[in-house]
Amino acid sequence: MPRAGLDPVAVTAAGAVLADEVGFAQLSMGLVAERLGVRTPSLYKHVDSQADLAHRIAVLAADELADAVGAAVQGRAGSAALAAAAQALRTYVKEHPGRYAALNGARATGPDDPFAAAGQRALGPLAAVLHGYDLPAAQEVHALRMLRSVLHGYVTLELASGFQLATDTDDSFSWVIDFIDHGLHATAADAAPTGARRTP
């Protein structure tokens, strides 16, 4: 019989916490079982495999990230929304590196996979922020990929202690976001019809 109170949600939550503590690459069903106080075979009553657990953690992370970034940009627009979204993503990744790693490694297996909807939710707040810059529709996907790439690269390097110079990393992060903001405004202005261009 499955342990009372143990279910897929509880197993996923325990796995997510452990992934943050020990690193996603080090996560194992044995560690999760030990954390929950059960034998490893008991977990398979609730999740199909370690791959299934990893996928569930990715769905959890996508939903959490969507909530964090969405809450941060609520009531903000333009430069303020961009800065808030970027900082919220940075904070989430630094607090939950294991879950974030699971998220980056996940792929939806089909349209009914919960990760498909969760992944779109995670991108939604960033896409909404960029939509506020009035970029040409054809460039919005490029801008979203650029923003994700820059934020991912910065925070990943930061977590790995990849920045060795004495300059404060918070100052550098603000500079990066300002640079992106100016670039987005300039791109939108260049694409605007003559007479409708705005000064950033």
Image (spheres, rainbow, N blue to C red):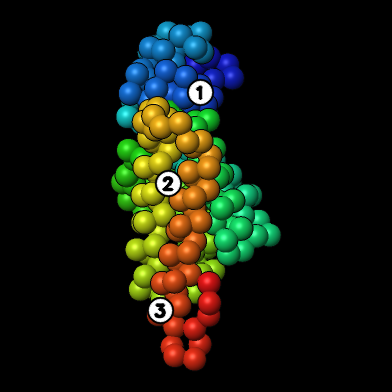
Q: Residue furthest front?
A: 166
Task: Using the numbered discs, state the Cα–Cα distance from disc 2 to disc 1 in whole angstroms.
Answer: 23 Å
Q: Residue sitting at 49 percent across and 44 percent down?
A: 173
The earlier-in-sequence mark between 1 and 3 is 1
10 Å neighbourhood of mark 1: few (<14), some, or many (≥20)?
some
At mark 1, the secondary structure is helix
- Image coords of residue 192 (percent x, y): 44, 83
Q: Is residue 8 visible?
A: no
Q: Relative to 56, say whether 88 is above or below.
A: below
Q: Residue sitting at 51 percent across and 13 percent down?
A: 36
Q: Amino acid at mark 2?
A: Leu
Q: Tell me the mark number nearer the camera, choosing from 2 and 3.
A: 3
Return the residue at label 1: 17
The earlier-in-sequence mark between 2 and 1 is 1
The earlier-in-sequence mark between 2 and 3 is 2
- Image coords of residue 72 (percent x, y): 62, 49
At mark 3, the secondary structure is helix
Q: Tell me the mark number nearer the camera, choosing from 2 and 1.
A: 2
Return the residue at label 3: 190
Nearer to the camera, 190 or 9: 190
- Image coords of residue 174 (percent x, y): 53, 48
Return the mark for residue 151: 2
Q: Relative to 174, say whether 29 is above or below.
A: above
At mark 2, the secondary structure is helix
